[in-house]
Amino acid sequence: MSRLDKIKEQHPDLNISLIDIISFLDPTDSYKYLDFLVKNFKNDNDYYSPNKEEFMGYMGVFLFGSGKIETLNEFERHSRLNRIQNKDISSYKNFLELHEVVKKADEIEKRKQLEKEILKIHEDDTWLVLTPLTFESSKVYGSNTKWCVTQEKYWVNYLSTHRLVYVLNKKTDTKIAFSRNFRLDYQKNRNPQIQAWDQLDKEVDPMFINFIPDELFLKIRKELQENKTTGDLIGWGDDVSTIRRRISDYSEPRTANDIVQETLRIWSSTNSDAIINPTNNDSRRAMFSNDMIERIKRLIGSEQNQTVSGRPDVNYNIDYSDDLP
């Protein structure tokens, strides 16, 4: 018995023909008006086609809607190309669940197509770290977030003043954006300032993003210390030296201890409902311990008595301004 015959046997209530349905509308027992109804169905119904396969396709769209049929077809296409992990259609409850996995597969496909439009900083089985070099890549790799740079007007505005780094967890689909504002760095004659943004575009403290390994964090910091905006990477807009020459507002240097105390002070006032919370097995959980202070110093690359100059290539600092990435 074929799969189709088996389904017909399991669902006799649906194993009916279109003629059966039309005949149900005939008010007579002798089907006196059936010919008339069939003729008018063929003449007046937009879904009818003399081509059987085409007609069945039209009726399928009528029954389920074009969006659901498209989702089903895309599920099959992505399944054949191994972009969907769970290919068992019976495990999905409805088209909404199917749509979600198709949407993720679409993103994987788009990322593959846009690999030449990103600067890949790191990739392993869990992590993908990159700088988007085009608006399209920023939008695709920043999908399912509220980051302003997934909107074209903000993307263009930040090209010559910012450097962006996206961090994607492949297993959890968690995303964090890091940014550096070169204009403010040179306005204030300060060390490279790093900001971080969760998927809701809420600023979070880079030092306490608990799920990113320290080694990866240090690699991101090193990348953002490079004197290149996103615009520099693609040969567009002002370079860093030009920005710096236009700025004359310099401030006094700070010591590493000043930086550490500022970090802890601001962290203590951080909103408790932040989307990222410390975990018990993470080294960042001991917020105010001596070990934590030493760890902060190590991550910012400063010794206790070292003075932090205004040069952007010396040390690392954290900015808490309201400037968006």
Image: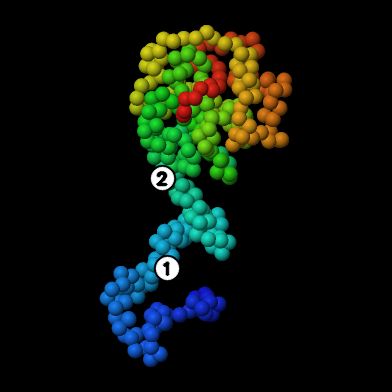
Q: Is residue 48 left or right of residue 128?
A: left
Comparing marks 2 and 1, which lies closer to the viewer?
1
Which residue occupies the foreground of this view, 200 or 35? 35
User: Which residue is identified by label 1?
Assistant: 63
Q: In whole angstroms, how far apart are the C-alphas of marks 2 and 1?
A: 34 Å
Which residue corresponds to the image point at 41% horizontal and 59% vertical from the top-left?
A: 67
Three-letter code, disc 2: Gln
Identity of the residue furthest to the top in this view: 252
Does residue 289 appear in this view? yes
Identity of the residue furthest to the bottom in this view: 30
Q: Is residue 285 left or right of residue 218?
A: right
Q: In the rendered view, would you say 44 is above or below 284?
A: below
Q: SS at mark 1?
A: helix
Q: How many marks?
A: 2
Q: Where is residue 20 in the image (x, y as percent from the top left)?
A: 42, 82
User: Which residue is identified by label 2?
Assistant: 113
Q: For label 1, count other residues whose C-alpha is less than 10 Å away and answer few (under 14), some (14-19) or many (20+).
A: few
Mark number for residue 198? none
Q: Are marks 2 and 1 in contact (CB under 8 Å)?
A: no
Q: For label 2, count other residues whose C-alpha is less than 10 Å away and answer few (under 14), some (14-19) or many (20+).
A: few
Q: In the rendered view, would you say 25 is above or below 60?
A: below
Q: Position of residue 161 (x, y in %)?
A: 41, 23
Identity of the residue furthest to the front in this view: 27
The first of marks 2 and 1 along the sequence is: 1
Which residue corresponds to the image point at 37% horizontal and 13% vertical from the top-left?
A: 246
Which residue corresponds to the image point at 32% horizontal and 81% vertical from the top-left?
A: 37
Q: SS at mark 2?
A: helix
Three-letter code, disc 1: Leu
Does residue 88 appear in this view? no
Q: Is residue 106 left or right of residue 204?
A: left
